[in-house]
Image: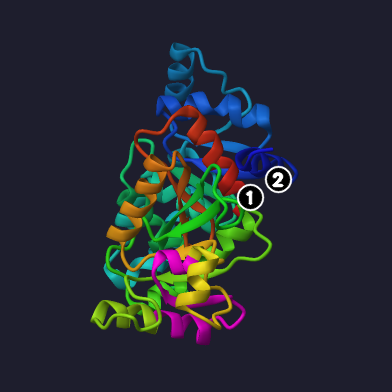
Amino acid sequence: MDLIAQIKEKAAKNVKAIVLPEGTEERTIQAIKGIIDSKVARPILLGDEGAIKGIASKIGADISGAEIINPEKAPFFDDFVQAFYEMRKSKGVDLDKAKATMLDPLFFASMMVKMDKADGEVAGAENTTGNVLRPALQIIKTSPGISAVSGAFIMIVPNCPYGDNGVFVFADCAVTIDPTAAQLAEFAKASVGTAVDLCGMKDPKIGMLSFSTKGSASHELVDKMVQATAIAKEKFPELKVDGEFQLDAAIVPSVGSSKAPGSPVAGDCNVLIFPDIQAGNIGYKLVQRTAKAEAIGPILQGIAKPVNDLSRGCSVEDIVNVVAMTAVRS
């Protein structure tokens, strides 16, 4: 059974409510049947019921299993307005602004998750990552002990003897452009959650990546990864983490034992933390294209409750899969 099938099977064992705020987006509407048929979640579409059903009829999509909520007519709309006002009044938000904001499906969806009206949120088929993240960070906020959001990719590399039988978690590849050492340590912690919850890894081992291994080069960029490693070990002592490592020292046993003798994880890492978004983004795409790897993500990490961002080029199948991943993390 492949990893996505395993995730779907896990989601179906404990069905969660996942809100999809882009209720009139055609691929999102088409994905409802797949979500229902595979029993990975109980989908909630946001928007005008007539408009959603009209589009579904036009494109021949079956949405009979979905709940449809029009934010403006929702019985808890006023409660959401009041809650948002209380959250943001120190930022200059008055009740009129709060009401206008709650009419935005992305903000309404995040409030549904915050107020336990839904277990998770999936959006991004027609919105940028920034538009998806902004309400989530204002309303749901980051997880305790986490100050920044990261975007991880699960990399499934065929015929690969490294990692967890060819499976890796790469982060951050999508969100925080130039993370601090402290944020990189947090990404390590969050990525282990992804490795365990979604990949089923029994023994996540984290490599903090650089162009240097254990002081083989001197530069402020190396210093940042050395500091990030130290912070991760101190703040999250339960983690199996070490660095700084060049990539080969992180994943190839013979190189790891040679370049980093005595390290508890060198040569055996399956969770790789990149020094910045340039390295992470280039790294995952390089592996995806040259090694014909499957890249699953980005998976948003560090938000207090599950929110995931779709690519605007996503397929219907992608939406079903991301809904399943979000449900598993709920």
Q: Dot 1: within a 10 Å radius of its alpha carbon, few (fewer than 14), some, or many (20 or more) residues? A: many
Q: By what rule are the colours in the image chosen?
A: rainbow
The residue labelled by disc 1 is 328
The amino acid on which the numbered mark 1 sits, given as a three-letter code, is: Val
Question: Residue at 52% of width from left, 83% of height from top?
Answer: 233
Q: Nearer the viewer, residue 155 or 143?
A: 155
Can you see residue 141? no
- Does the CB distance between marks 1 and 2 fall below 8 Å? yes
Q: Is 286 positioned to the left or the right of 330 in the image?
A: left
Nearer to us in this view, 68 or 247: 247
Quadrant position of residue 52: top left
Q: Give the residue drawn at x 26%, y 83%.
A: 218
Residue 117 percent location from the top left of the image: 59, 50
- Looking at the figure, which quarter contains the C terminus? bottom right
- Rendering coords of residue 310 (x, y %): 41, 42
Q: Which mark is residue 297?
A: none
Give yes or no for residue 234 being in the magenta stretch.
yes
The kind of residue on which mark 2 rests is Lys
Lower sequence index among marks 1 and 2: 2
User: Considering only vertical position in the picture, is 162 above or below 216?
Assistant: above
Judge from the rendering whether residue 240 lies leftward or rightward of residue 15; answer left or right.
left
Instruction: Give the residue at mark 2.
Output: 10
- Residue 154 lies in the magenta stretch: no
Q: How far from the left and from the top, in percent, is residue 14?
A: 73, 46
| Segment colored magenta | 228-250
* 246 lies above or below 152: below
Q: Residue furthest right?
A: 13
